[in-house]
Image (tube, coloured by chain):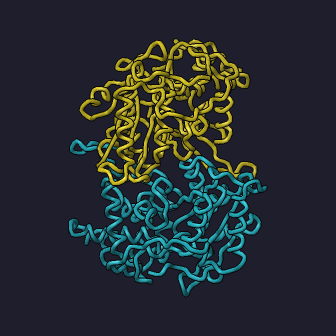
Chain colours: A yellow, B cyan
Amino acid sequence: MLSASRRVFLGLFAASVATGTAPPFVLASGAAPLASWANGDARERIISFVESTVKEGGPSFVPPEDRIAVFDNDGTLWSEKPAYFQLFFALDRIKAMAPDHPEWKDVEPYKSILADDFENLAKLGEHALLEVLMQTHAGMSVDQFQAFVTAWLANAKHPKFQRGYDTLVFQPMLELLSYLRDNGYQTWIVSGGGIEFLRTFAEKTYGIPPQQVVGSSIVTEFQMVDGKPTLVRLPKIDFIDDKAGKPVGINKFIGKRPIFAAGNSDGDLQMLQWTSAGAGPRFGMIVHHTDADREFAYDRESSVGRLDKALDEAPSAGWLVVDIKNDWTQVFPAI
Amino acid sequence: MLSASRRVFLGLFAASVATGTAPPFVLASGAAPLASWANGDARERIISFVESTVKEGGPSFVPPEDRIAVFDNDGTLWSEKPAYFQLFFALDRIKAMAPDHPEWKDVEPYKSILADDFENLAKLGEHALLEVLMQTHAGMSVDQFQAFVTAWLANAKHPKFQRGYDTLVFQPMLELLSYLRDNGYQTWIVSGGGIEFLRTFAEKTYGIPPQQVVGSSIVTEFQMVDGKPTLVRLPKIDFIDDKAGKPVGINKFIGKRPIFAAGNSDGDLQMLQWTSAGAGPRFGMIVHHTDADREFAYDRESSVGRLDKALDEAPSAGWLVVDIKNDWTQVFPAI
């Protein structure tokens, strides 16, 4: 259970998180399909695949009900550096809660968080991270949690780009989502991130409704609170939707095998394998972060979004490896 | 965890299960809406509610993305007597597996099952039932399990009605599902039954695709079997989608509160409460089994499908109590 949280934790490093007011990001309505994709192999392969699957009577035709496309979120639909954005939410939340917890200034891991001492925080290990996650994600109703996330997204800014986290989505991927939907595909998120966290912005940002979001979860309990039915979030992990958990999550929530999968790290390897192993036309895609100027460049050595085994397997599996630097003419949407 | 299985077990009684070949049931395409509902209050309330929610500009208008309707399955969409149909599947499966397990003829609970001694089987208690469920539902891939269920549905016949289990669906509820979908509603199953069991027939029988089925589940694991990605079902309960579990399942899978809920037993009470407690127009419905001639008559004293607390709460909550005997002109579809 802790391996996913360790991954999160290893990605944490010193970063100052400024707050401010970001305009709500609005999904651009696409004109030409995949307009921010460079003319070339990547764009052509996507279009060729999609066109072949919607051509009625063609050898690769896929009926609409089977046009299921799954997307990882962190590093695939939005950025994931310098750490998973959900971790920034947790740290900001600790700071917001601190006035009610004067004892925290002397107790780890809160002491380090409040002092922005990320170096020390990183040394405290996995258990400290789990405590922070549970402290900030449990002990409240689902509605309350989503309100916290929504308020945070409206105000927090990314340390490098100084814009709202939900504006750091990849324009070419927004276009890909729209293009797939225009061709009768159902688009799903299958993320290691928290399912309720994702649901606060997935519809507005990606056009993906709550019921098409699969993610990690903590246990939720139905309680009558003051005579009112309430879903309360408990400090206990329910499901980790990462690595081998992704095909499990796909099967649990979707109940059928996707024909299209996009990821960016070894956390997506099994999802890509599961998608590709079905009969009929299949498309696997890996977003390779190669652009240190416009975004970040990382792969095999990265603690967050490590891409190693999946990169090795891509050629024999026939997965498209998208080179951000060369395949995307624009990375983030204009705000 | 065992309360749901106890409920199943208590419903078990002596019944001979014949097998044969049933024609596949095909959902009738509706002409007039709710044609098998008697003219009267029940039918009028449903139509009045639905019409009010789709009237643009009206005070009760609900945008299409929020038109979520949830349906219990056992006793709400299909019959559940003399025992949950999934239990008949399990018992038939034990018989089918028996030739490979000669030792079973001397070991309980198999001995009783193979001898059709349901009286003795009922005495063996909850643990025996759980063993039967795990023996018949785990230790195979998801694909294999679904193939077993599909083959069973194609051949097994209900002991009383002598027709396929998937033909013992309620014609008026099929019409209600269609009517809601025709009005832009998403129809979901939220059942205490097994999610993968339901998915084998939900699309063909109810027009509800796999990704709109919520149910109980056992743990599934991603494994490479002979180099092939495989989802293997393990003998461990993952989630019981019953009673207080239903709002939890709804929140997990759908991520938003339904505006319409239909059930038939106290197992649906919390789902009805959760649905009704939201803001705006809400509709709760209880199918009351009052027709011993055409189906079965039971409520407060029944071990399977016990309807007691929810029946008490219905008037103050404003839930429609459907009286099968008087409100439905036809119970099962013609085959």
Q: Is residue A90 visible?
A: no
- Taking B117 as reference, is B194 above or below it? above
Screen quadrant of the N terminus of chain A: top left
Image coords of residue B198 (percent x, y): 44, 62
Residue drawn where x is 49% and y is 24% of the image: A80
Residue at image position (52%, 61%) is B191
* Image location of residue B159, percent across then percent down: 41, 81
Q: Is residue B94 visible?
A: yes
User: x%, y% of residue A188?
Assistant: 48, 42
Q: Where is residue A286 in the image (x, y as percent from the top left)?
A: 37, 30
Please state, as top left, top right, bottom left or bottom right, where the C terminus of chain A lies in the image. top right
Q: Is residue B266 above or below residue B144?
A: below
Figure quadrant of residue A15: top right
Quadrant of the image occupied by residue B140: bottom left
Furthest-front residue in this view: A32
Direction from residue B302 to residue A186 in the image, left or right: left
